[in-house]
Amino acid sequence: MPPALSAAQLTLEQVDQAVVHAHSVGHGLRRSHTWLSREVPGKRSGLGFSLAFQVFRRRSERTVLSIAWTGDSAPAFDGAPVAATAADVRSTHHIVVDVAGERRGVATAGELVASGTPGAWPIAGVLPPLYPEWLGDRSFTEAHGTRFPYITGDMANGIATVEMVTAMARAGCLGFFGAGGLGFARVEVAVGELHAALGDTLPWGCNLIHSPNEPALEAAVADLYIRAGVRKVSAAAYMSLTPAIVRYAYSGVSQRPDGLIDRPNAVFAKISRPEVARHFMNPAPKPMVDALVANGQLTTEEGRLAASLAVAEDYTIESDSGGHTDNRPLAPLFSVIAAVRDEVVAARGYPRPLRLGAAGGIGTPQAVASAFALGAAYVLTGSINQACVESGLSDEGKAMLAMADIADITMAPAADMFELGVQLQVLKRGTMFAPRAKQLYEIYRAYPSLESIPAEIAADIEKRVLGTSIAQCWADTREFWMNRDPDQLAKAEADPRVKMALTFRSYLGLSSRWAIDGQADRRMDYQIWCGPAMGAFNAWTAGSFLADPANRSAPQVAMNLLEGAAVLTRAHQFRTYGVAVPPSAFHYAPRPLL
């Protein structure tokens, strides 16, 4: 505890000590008299407060610039005027000091004059205009040709439609087509449509999902992207690297005469675990690259350059999201993966940046602003886009999402990794998909084959879940795989557990299709991927024009989130300068911006 001193004895260094100590024990500058008065028994409201006032005054004197501000309108010092000023992000703001009144405020417009000018306010800082375009990493927008550091995610089964990707590109953002879960022919058509609509001038990309049960499809889609010139890929559900994603990442890599590297293909790796981040942040394993070179899928030069390049340069850190998720909170996950990134970059000496984006729980301006405050180069939204007009989800599904609260979500078995017990996050309100899918998985674990399932259990799932006999379900499943991947049928004929898994997976796959098509008689079986961002978004938009699903265009949502994040960021900047910022300054109401 610093010794008690009179106001006259306080040196500038002791002023600093006083402020530091006051903050260290949990008091702000306005309450620093707490410890000062305790040093003077019997004078808690006398000398203690006087010393605190002197501390504030002398601290302010040290931070006041040698210029001042004057204008026709008075500065805002608290309440609604400060909130209104924070919302005016495209103006220059001056932080003015009222030493006599022990406060700081904000002034807009006016002019700067010499310090000491009669009637002018001393200033402690100047904040230039703040634009939503500048919230993220400038290298992101430059590298990918976007105006805004904002991405719409690759919701599978084509829910992230060609129309959504096109709309986002034309709005200055980046969107990924949801190729996961679709057959090769449908993906090929979508790539052609995107090329026709956007060409190579506007930014767009497609999803490449890790498919452990269909490695041939994963490889074929990667080959399509390389041949068709799809320059951006969102790599999802990867636990380790596969030849397909490695081949895409390094195809076309070349070195200029000046030594700089050109990478035509950009991989956006969706990451929720630090160990998976390491796979993508380091060069691909040499044996895998050598095998691709030996097979003619990479050139010798591409293989040589791959040894010094990370597999991906953009990382979408996926926290508590809809669909595949580890349900991790964003802040600690981002911090851990940022530390891994820094460690790898320092060890490898990469000349090109590895950017970290944020996803999962991004559904309000507060979430967007906090993600950028963590250091995110960009933000990616997912669940909330499914409720937008460009989404491939049915109107009924969109209406269900519009009713969701923050707790109306649950976990359920994933169709693409059913046998592994992998789960994904889905909407709980208004649908029985999750408990029914869990019942199928429990039966799969309990019995060795379809034929061994007890009759009463089989009858129950035929009536309440499958909606048909197990025999008919298998017949339909067999026909599907005969057209998509006959090798799966050979495995099923040889292994009754594979047959049972394929049969039960058909329900999980169809449940998503029913939600997309809006099949009314299967409404209680809709599988709609959804994270907590959806409920938060609905709460934020309640009572506004965005409460109506018909007004929820993906670009309109994006602009409101970014604009709101800029306003909240400005309010926080005011607060860091000592301005008394009211809670209302941290709320941005949706409004038509396009």
Image (cartoon, rainbow, N blue to C red):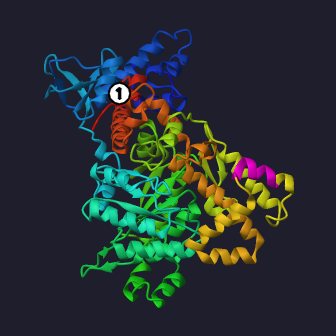
* Residue 462 is one of the magenta-drawn residues: yes
Q: Residue at x 63, y 59 (%)?
A: 415
Is 453 drawn above or below residue 378 in the view shown? below
Give the position of the C terminus as an image quadrant.
Answer: top left
The amino acid sitting under disc 1 is Arg
Pointer 1: what residue?
Answer: 59
Is 60 or 491 nearer to us in this picture? Answer: 491
**Is there any visible trace of residue 312 in the rendered image?**
no
The answer to whether 479 appears left or right of 53 in the picture is right
Q: Residue at x 37, y 44 (%)?
A: 554
The answer to whether 133 appears left or right of 176 in the picture is left
Which SS class for mark 1? helix
* Residue 400 is one of the magenta-drawn residues: no
Is 60 drawn above or below residue 51 in the view shown? below
Residue 194 image offset from top left, x and y in percent? 33, 62
Residue 357 image offset from top left, x and y in percent? 43, 53
The answer to whether 377 appears left or right of 414 in the picture is left
Q: Residue at x 46, y 12 (%)?
A: 47
Residue 451, by quadrant, is bottom right
Q: Which residues are magenta?
A: 458-467
Q: Residue at x 64, y 63 (%)?
A: 417
Residue 28 image offset from top left, x and y in percent? 47, 25
Is 132 drawn above or below residue 77 in the view shown? below
Residue 308, by quadrant, is bottom left
